[in-house]
Image (spheres, rainbow, N blue to C red):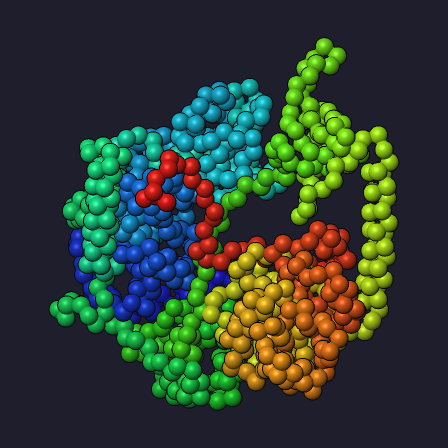
Amino acid sequence: MHLDLSWLLPLIEEMPAYQRLVAGMAGHNIRVAVLDAAKPYLIAALYHRFRLPMLVVTAQPEKSKRLYGQLLSWVVTTSQVRVFPEPDALPYQRVASDTMAELERVGVLSALVGIEGEQKMIRPPLVVVSAPALMAKTTLYRDFTSTSHTVRVGMEIEPLELLNQWQAMGYRLESLVEVPGTMSHRGGIIDIYPPNSDRPTRLEFFGNTVDSIRLFDPLNQCSLTSVPSIAITPATERLTSPSDSLFSYLSPSGWLVLDEPESIRAAVETLHDQADELHSQLVGRGELEPDCPRPYFTWPELETEMKKRHCLMLAAFGVSDTKLPCLDFAPAPNYAGQLAKFIEKSKQMAKQKYRLIIVSHQASRLSELLAEEGVFAPPLTEVKKTPPLGSVSLVQGSLAGGWVMANNTYLFSDAEIFGFVKQPRLWKKRAVPYHKLSISLAAGDYVVHVEHGIAKFAGVTTMSANGSEKEYLVLHYAGGDRLYVPADQIDRISRYIGSQKPLLSRLGTQEWTRTKQKVRESVADIAQELLALYAAREVISGFGFSPDTVWQQELEASFPYVETPDQIAVQAQVKEDMAESKPMDRLVCGDVGYGKTEVAIRAAFKAVMDGKQVAVLVPTTVLAEQHLATFSQRLNAFPVRVEALSRFKTTKEQEAILDGLTNGSVDICIGTPRLLQQDIAFKDLGRLIIVEEQRVGVVHKADLKKMRRAVDVLTLSATPIPRTLHISLGGVRDMSTMETPPEERLPVRTFVAEYNERLI
C-alpha cells in the first residue's frame, strides 16, 4: 500500500522561516540550509504550494533514486513524480544504449512539455535528475515539440503515411506491440505504444478515416477502453544532430532545485575529466575523430542555463555557511531499539502537548505498547486532517528518517526507534515482450519425431512436389535412413533433451513404438502412485498452526528490505495453508534473488513457534552452508537452534545434531540428502522445506514421498522439473509464483563488437 503523508504538508506553514522562504521565491537564486531528512518534505510542500513544474538536481544517481522514493510518500499525485535516468555508459564509450532507459527519458521529456498520452495532465511534473543524467545532451526542444502530435477519432489521414511518420520518430515496426516504442500494422488496424502512455493504443481505420481509438492490454492484446484522442511523442532522443539540455524542457515559470550545488558541480567536473581522458585515448588510437561533437554539457554551460532559472539551492544542514538562513528542522532523538524508553518519552511528549507522528513498519506492535501506557494510537492507513498539538499519530509504513520541526512537531521513523529502517524498493514497470516458444535447430542437433523417434537433424532442403517447391527438414536415422519432414509439420519435431549421446532410431521397425509403450506404462505407474499420495494427503488430518505471535511479527519487521508485492502475496498463501488442518504441499517458483528464502524462513519460524521441528533439504553442501548462514543471521535474536548436516561436519558434530533432532533441542536442521538417511529421527517434524527438488536423486525422492503424507511441504525452485510443474499447474499441488525482481537487477545484455583487448 502506498504511504501517503501529504496530510502533514500544511504543518510547515506554521514555520516563520518557511514563510520567509516562500516570500523570497519571487527572486532567481535563493540559498537555504535544511536537514537532509527534511528535504523531501520541504520539496513536496513547495511543489504543492506553487503547482509549477519542478526539476530537482542531485549529485549522484543513487541519491536521485533515493530522493525520488522518499518524495512518493509526500506527494498526493505520485504519477507526476518522475526520475530522469542517466546514460548507462561514459560519454564516448562504444556501448549500445539501454532502449528502455531511453524511452523512460523520452517519457519525462513528454511530461515536462505537457504531453501525457491519452489523458490531460492533472498536475505539472516533479522531476528528479542526477548530475550525470543532466549532463547528457537530449533532443532539440523545437524538434521534440514539432514532431509530437495528436491523433483524434474522425481524423482524415492515410495509414501508411502515418506509419512512415512514426518510423521517422523512432518507432519500430513489429508483428505485435508489446513494449513502448513499437508499432504494428494489420489491414485497417494500427497499434502503437507511445513512451508517454501507460497503455498501447489501437487505431481502427475506415478507409483513411480514424474510426476508433482504443487502449489495449499488451499481454493479451485485448481492447480495454475507448478514448477520443491519443498524443504521440518521439520514441527516441536521436531525431537530429542539434541537441538541447534538460533545462530547455523546463517551463520558464518552473523551479530548479539544486540539492547541495557544490556536490553537483564536483560530480559534473569529475565525469567531464573521465570523459575527456577517454576521448584522448580513443583519438590517440584512431578510433575517434578529434573534432567529434561532445555528447554532454560541461559545468560552465550548465551553470549559464541555471542562472536563467528560478533556482532554490539547498545546502547541507550543520556543515554549511553559518550565514545562510536555516529552516527550523532538527534531527529527531535516536532510541536505537530502547523501546521502553521511547514509549515513556512518547507518553511524556503527548502530555506536554507536543505533536507526535510515528511512521513504522511495526505500527501494530507500537500501538499495543503505547496502549499499555494509556496512550491510544491505533495504526492508521489513511488520514484526512492535520493532527493537533498533543496528539499521537501512528502510521503503518517506512521513512528514511525523522525530524523535529519548529520545536513542537516530532516525526519518528524506524531509523530512530529501532536503529534501522527497511530499504525501500523502487518498482519500475518495464514492459517485457512475451515470445511464444519456438524450436531453434542447428545441423547436428539430436531431435525427436513424435512418430519415428530419435534422429539427427541435417539441415533444410528444397524439393519440388506437385509442381511447387517446398522446404523440408532432413533427419538422419540409424542405418543411413533419411526422413524428409515438410516445414509446415515442424510441430511434430522437438529437440532431444538428455545428458548423454542417444542411440538413433531405425525407420520401418517397431522399436520406437515399443519405447513409447514403456514410457506410457511408466507414466501410468507414476500417476497411480501420485494419485494415491495426494488422495491420502486429502484425508489425513494435519496440524493447523496457530495465528502469528508477537515474535513472528518482530521477525517479519526485522527484514531489512520492503517486501515485494509477490513476497507479501506468497507469504499470505503459505500462512493460509499452515492454518488448515490438512497437510500442506505448495510449490513456490521464482528466480534467484526474488525472495523465496525469506518466505521459507518465516514459514519455518512459524512452525517452530508451535513447537514443531523443520527440515530444510538442499541439494549441495555449499548450499547447505549458505542457507545455514542466512537462517542463523535472520533468527539470531530468537531462542531458535539452527543446525546443518553435511560432510563439512565431523562425526562427533553430526552425532550431537542427531541427538538434538531426536530430543527436540534442534529446531531447524538444514542438510543435504543426508537428512533422509535411516539414522535420522525427528522428535516432532512439522515442516519440510525442499530447495530445488529437481536436483535431488530418484532414490531420495522416494523417501520424500513418504514424508509428504503427513508433513507440511514447501518446495522452492527457480526451475522446477516438468513433472512437478505439470502437477502444480494441474491443481494437484498448490503453486505460487514470484515474478518481481529485486531492485537494481539489470537485464542481461549482449554486445557484438570488433575484437578489442581494452574493451574486454
Q: Quadrant of residue 32?
A: bottom left
In the rendered view, would you say 420 is above or below 134? Answer: below
Left or right placement of residue 12 versus residue 313 in this view: right
The quadrant of the picture occupied by the C terminus is top left
Residue 519 position, x and y percent, is: 82, 47
Residue 332 position, x and y percent, is: 33, 77
In this view of the protein, which residue sits in the foreground, 277 or 379?
Answer: 277
Q: Is residue 339 visible?
A: yes
Q: Residue at x 47, y 31 (%)?
A: 172
Residue 122 position, x and y percent, is: 41, 48
Residue 349 position, x and y percent, is: 37, 85
Q: Is residue 261 visible?
A: no
In the rendered view, would you say 399 is above or below 137? Answer: below
Q: Residue at x 58, y 26 (%)?
A: 186
Q: Residue at x 59, y 39 (%)?
A: 435
In this view of the protein, which residue sits in the foreground, 739 or 206?
Answer: 739
Query: Which residue, as the protein is rendered here, is positioned at the far top?
Result: 467
Left or right placement of residue 507 versus residue 284 in this view: right
In this view of the protein, which residue sits in the foreground, 94 or 29?
Answer: 94
Q: Residue at x 21, y 44 (%)?
A: 276
